[in-house]
Image: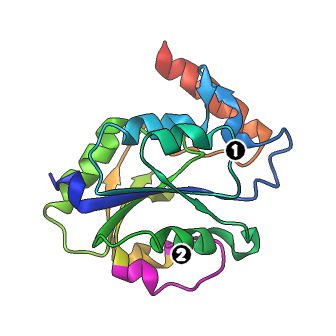
């Protein structure tokens, strides 16, 4: 397994959240804590070389990230989309590899992050991404130089690199993210099922 201390971790939490109609989705309470704190709890168990989270402002959920040693990379221009948020985070990174995670993806288990790091020890491709059914995307371990070459604005993040990626498969729906209140309700039900 690749040593996490040689890798940066970047949590993307600066999305506009315009389709979520009940406040800040990252502050929505799930299992007794904000949505954004679930991926934080998983990541905090690793000794990353650098920790960054992008955010639009200092919100209640960001305090726990600061306390966990994350640099809060403010991303005020939400019109640049996910790529803008990605590049804002990359400005804080000098490591050769970075693990990209989404703050609104609260079901990802520690074991999956470990499997990404294990595959990275043997893979030479620019991206090691997650896969489940039709899903391909983060969490994804990327070579930083390839990310820096991406456009500075737009949605889809590093999706254009996926044809060059290796994948770590998961059968469970752990890569569900939250765009709408209905998404949150679905994830709440999944979370409760996992907790039983």
Q: Classify 31 as above or below 112.
A: above
Residue 168 appears in the picture as rendered: yes
Point 34% across, 50% down: residue? 169
The local secondary structure at tag 2 comes to: helix
> Residues under labels 2 and 1: Cα distance?
21 Å
Residue 107 appears in the picture as rendered: no
In percent of width and height, residue 14 lies at 65, 58
Residue carrying label 1: 59
In percent of width and height, residue 95 lies at 29, 70
Give left or right: position of 123 versus 33.
left
Point 81% across, 52% down: residue? 19
Residue carrying label 2: 87
In the foreground, 153 or 136? 153
In percent of width and height, residue 128 lies at 32, 64
Q: Classify 147 as above or below 28.
A: below
The local secondary structure at tag 1 comes to: loop
């Amino acid at each position: 397994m690749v040593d996490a201390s040689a890798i940066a971790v970047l949590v993307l939490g600066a999305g506009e959240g315009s389709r979520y109609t009940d406040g800040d989705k990252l502050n929505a309470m799930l299992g007794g804590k904000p949505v954004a704190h679930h991926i934080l709890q998983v990541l905090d168990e690793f000794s990353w070389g650098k920790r960054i989270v992008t955010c639009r402002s200092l919100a209640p959920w960001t305090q726990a990230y600061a306390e966990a040693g994350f640099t809060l990379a403010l991303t005020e221009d939400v019109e640049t989309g996910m790529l803008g948020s990605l590049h804002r985070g990359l400005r804080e990174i000098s490591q050769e590899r970075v693990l990209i995670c989404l703050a609104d993806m609260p079901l990802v288990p520690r074991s999956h992050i470990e499997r990404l790091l294990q595959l990275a020890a043997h893979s030479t491709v620019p991206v090691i991404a997650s896969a489940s059914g039709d899903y391909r995307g983060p969490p994804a371990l990327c070579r930083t130089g390839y990310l820096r070459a991406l456009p500075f604005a737009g949605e889809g993040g590093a999706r254009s690199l996926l044809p060059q990626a290796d994948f770590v498969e998961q059968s469970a729906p752990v890569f569900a993210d939250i765009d709408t209140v209905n998404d949150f309700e679905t994830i709440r039900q999944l979370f409760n099922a996992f907790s039983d």
